[in-house]
Image: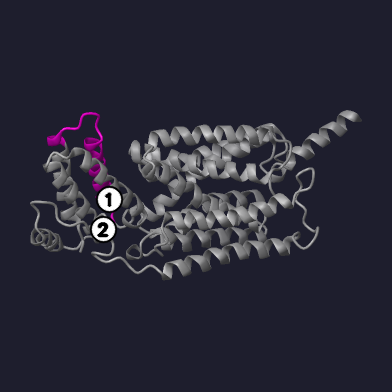
């Protein structure tokens, strides 16, 4: 009898490590997806760690967080959601590694991750006899649970990129499509479809929904976004997540079981109210901040450092002539690339004077601007975007070499500015 009691107690304690699937659960999940993606990009580009170092750092931090999660004896919201954010980052990085580094097509990577997820579910079911979230009550089941979550993030990234980039749906349509599919899965659940199936379908879809939502808020208005920028969006989402997770932390009892009816903060109605309030804050603050940003134009899209005076030897008339020459090109789907060409031309001038250190410092602005505009440009013409992305990488590599060569830097920059001018769609 004591053995039975111990088994039941252990199961009950492990069960508390998985949160209740409520409205706030889904809101935190979607917002944390965007936080994960923008933070990884910030470390890679803005901080300058590069993809390999960022991947290694994030994988190490995730492993540490999961160790803490597995060692806890009850559901602890801040640890659980930290793991979700980190899994979001690493899952995205896995897909990006296959797509950007190895050149695997999004069609193939989406299919591969779908097969991997199916295998995880099959092995999980054969080993444990169930896939129900409420049955994640042993270390083995929790291991399968996190393995499935990691795979869903990789699959969601690949499927989302396939829809918004390869199929050129764009992030605005992405928000509508993926949000609509999640609603459809909820309707199917209410109509009697299996809870496990509809949960995991919705879980996969939250990844591309969160990414599309983040792009909608961060991208410049010329790309169809609200021009909040990655920093403002991340801070906004992070603030809402903190409030909702703190509420989750307050709504657990000594065994980690979420209290549904204790006090005004508990109950499903209150949960819906908090979830709706979180979304309302995101929408209201986002629209208010967006109203302060005007759409970028040929000159306003440039930063202060982009709008420098002509360097010695480069007159204002020659600069205007170069801009006019770019505008003479036929319209392409990529649109206005003037701001990028301006930076490259500036770097070229510095390299021509053998100021390689100055060129290296200046090209950082191109790297950041190109990364910020990726979600808006890439869906317009993926093949041309990839060509430019590769040529930008070549220029960065040449200037950041241990012993950079002036001739190598000049050649890489000449190729890049030629392609920018050719693809410019003014």
Residue that extends furthest to the right in the rendered view of this protein = 1
The secondary structure making up most of the magenta span is: helix
Question: Which of disc 1 and disc 2 is earlier in sequence?
Answer: 2
Q: In the drawing, what numbered circle is on residue 117?
A: none
The image quadrant that residue 228 belongs to is: bottom left
Q: Is 405 in the magenta?
A: yes
In the rendered image, the quadrant that contains the N terminus is top right
**Residue 198 at x, y = what percent?**
61, 53
Count of picture labels: 2
> What's the coloring here?
one colour
Q: Is residue 249 left or right of residue 104?
A: right
In the rendered image, the quadrant that contains the C terminus is bottom left
Q: Which residue is drawn at 14% across and 59% down?
A: 326
Q: Name the residue under label 2.
A: 334
Q: In the drawing, what numbered circle is on residue 385?
A: 1
**Residue 257 at x, y = what percent?**
76, 47
- Looking at the rendering, the stretch of residues picked out in magenta corresponds to 381-408
Q: Is 52 in the magenta?
A: no
Helix, strand or loop for disc 1: helix
Q: Which residue is drawn at 24% across and 32% down?
A: 401
Determine crowd level at label 1: few under 14, some 14-19, many 20+ residues with C-alpha closer than 10 A.
some
Image height of 2 relative to 364, above or below: above
Q: Is residue 11 left or right of residue 194?
A: right
């Amino acid at each position: 009898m004591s053995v039975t009691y111990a088994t039941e107690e252990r199961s009950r304690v492990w069960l508390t490590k998985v949160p209740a699937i409520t409205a706030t659960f889904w809101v935190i999940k979607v917002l944390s997806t965007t936080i994960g993606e923008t933070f990884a990009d910030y470390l890679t580009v803005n901080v300058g760690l590069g993809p390999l170092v960022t991947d290694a750092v994030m994988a190490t931090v995730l492993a540490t967080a999961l160790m803490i999660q597995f060692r806890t004896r009850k559901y602890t919201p801040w640890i659980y959601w930290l793991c979700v954010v980190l899994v979001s980052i690493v899952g995205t990085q896995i897909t990006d590694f296959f797509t950007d580094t190895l050149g695997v097509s999004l069609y193939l990577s989406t299919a591969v991750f779908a097969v991997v997820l199916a295998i995880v579910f099959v092995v999980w079911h054969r080993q444990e006899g169930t896939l129900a979230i409420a049955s994640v009550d042993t270390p083995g089941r929790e291991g399968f649970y996190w393995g499935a979550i990691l795979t869903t993030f990789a699959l969601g990234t690949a499927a989302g990129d396939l829809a918004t980039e390869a199929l050129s749906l764009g992030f605005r349509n992405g928000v509508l499509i993926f949000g609509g599919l999640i609603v459809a899965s909820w309707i199917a659940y209410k109509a009697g479809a299996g809870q496990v199936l509809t949960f995991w379908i919705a879980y996969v879809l939250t990844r591309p929904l969160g990414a599309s939502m983040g792009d909608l808020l961060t991208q410049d208005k010329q790309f169809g976004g609200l021009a909040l920028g990655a920093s403002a969006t991340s801070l906004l989402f992070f603030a809402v997540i903190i409030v909702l997770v703190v509420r989750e932390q307050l709504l657990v009892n000594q065994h980690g079981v979420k209290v549904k009816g204790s006090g005004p903060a508990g109950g499903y109605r209150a949960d819906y109210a908090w979830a709706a309030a979180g979304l309302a804050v995101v929408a209201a603050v986002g629209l208010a901040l967006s109203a302060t940003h005007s759409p970028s134009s040929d000159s306003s899209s440039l930063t202060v450092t982009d709008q420098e005076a002509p360097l010695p030897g480069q007159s204002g008339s020659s600069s205007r002539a170069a801009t006019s020459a770019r505008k003479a090109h036929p319209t392409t789907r990529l649109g206005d690339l003037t701001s990028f060409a301006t930076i490259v031309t500036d770097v070229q001038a510095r390299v021509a004077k053998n100021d390689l250190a100055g060129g290296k410092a200046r090209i950082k602005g191109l790297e950041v601007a190109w990364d910020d505009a990726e979600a808006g440009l890439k869906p317009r013409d993926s093949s041309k975007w990839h060509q430019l992305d590769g040529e930008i990488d070549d220029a960065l590599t040449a200037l950041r070499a241990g012993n950079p060569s002036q001739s190598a830097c000049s050649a890489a920059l000449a190729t890049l500015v030629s392609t920018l001018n050719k693809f410019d769609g003014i």
